[in-house]
Amino acid sequence: MYDHLPLERLARYAGYSPYHFARMFKERTGLSPLYYVSSHRLQRAKDMLLRTGLTVRDISLEIGQQSLGTFTSRFAARVGMSPAEFRNSVQYAGDQMSSLRKLQDWRSSYPISRLPSSVHGTISAEVPFNGVILIGLFAKPIPEGLPLYGTLLSSLGHFHFDHVAPGTYYLLATSISWGTRTLDLLLPHATLRTRSRAPIHVGPGSLVPHQQVTLHPPRLDDPPILISLPLLMNRFLNRIAVR
């Protein structure tokens, strides 16, 4: 079972004062140390939901969360569904991937937008892959909760989001190869991913600089991908269906 990790204890491991440790950690990851730790605990909860027969209550205790209600609400907010729904989503995930593979009209030939309040750019990859890219603008530099703006791409290249409301966003993306097992789709530990280290600021009527991002294998300081990827796939498929 995970025990409580106060900031002072984490800072002592690193040999810094709590203040300097927290400041340097956030500069490096964009997240506070305790938020980063809680994110990995939720990722561990996702693993246990699919790989063990432990009850949701036991899993909440295993990751150091005494309140079942608090664990359930935090999980739902950051993954996009309740722990029970996530545990039962294997068939759902397989269906979404199958539907995407059959999709003919991805609407991937977008005109390159230079409109004010649009976020546009190019996505590349360090290694070749054949699959789908999930990309979105999030409120925090971690892929959790539903993106404020999101879409799927059938290939590397241009992307854009139009009519983005004024605010501060973080661009995050991951890729899923067509041959990915359903379990690895639900627990994307090894997928290529990328994220903007610096926030993207969108002002009223402002022109946002072109964003260039590169998908790469997981790195030690990457935050976990908490949002349920099949949920994002389903939103995309529903949006395509009503066009």
Image (spheres, helix red, strand yellow):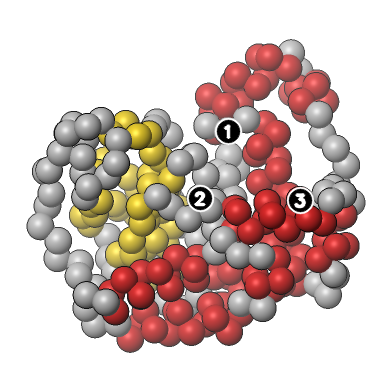
- Please tell me which residue is depicted at 38% across the width and 38% down the height of the picture: 169
Task: Give the image location of residue 93, x and y in percent.
Answer: 53, 77
Would you call the spot at circle 2 few (<14 residues within 10 Å), some (14-19), or many (20 or more)? many
Most foreground residue, 76 or 141: 76
Task: Give the image location of residue 102, x and y in percent.
Answer: 33, 86
Answer with mark 3 or mark 2, whichever residue precedes in sequence: 3
Q: Marks 2/1: CA distance?
A: 12 Å
Which element type, helix, strand or loop, lies under badge 2? loop
- 8 with respect to 119 (left or right): right
| Residue to which mark 2 is pinned | 143
| Residue to which mark 3 is pinned | 70
Task: Give the image location of residue 224, x and y in percent.
Answer: 59, 50
- Please tell me which residue is depicted at 21% across the width and 40% down the height of the picture: 117
Which element type, helix, strand or loop, lies under badge 3? helix
Amino acid at pointer 2: Pro
Q: Marks 3/2: CA distance?
A: 20 Å
Answer with mark 1 or mark 3, whichever residue precedes in sequence: 1
Q: Report which quarter residue 3 is drawn in.
A: top right
- Please tell me which residue is depicted at 27% across the width and 44% down the height of the picture: 164
Would you call the spot at circle 1 few (<14 residues within 10 Å), some (14-19), or many (20 or more)? some
Amino acid at pointer 1: Leu
Residue 121: tell me if it is visible: no
Q: Nearer the viewer, mark 3 or mark 2?
A: 3
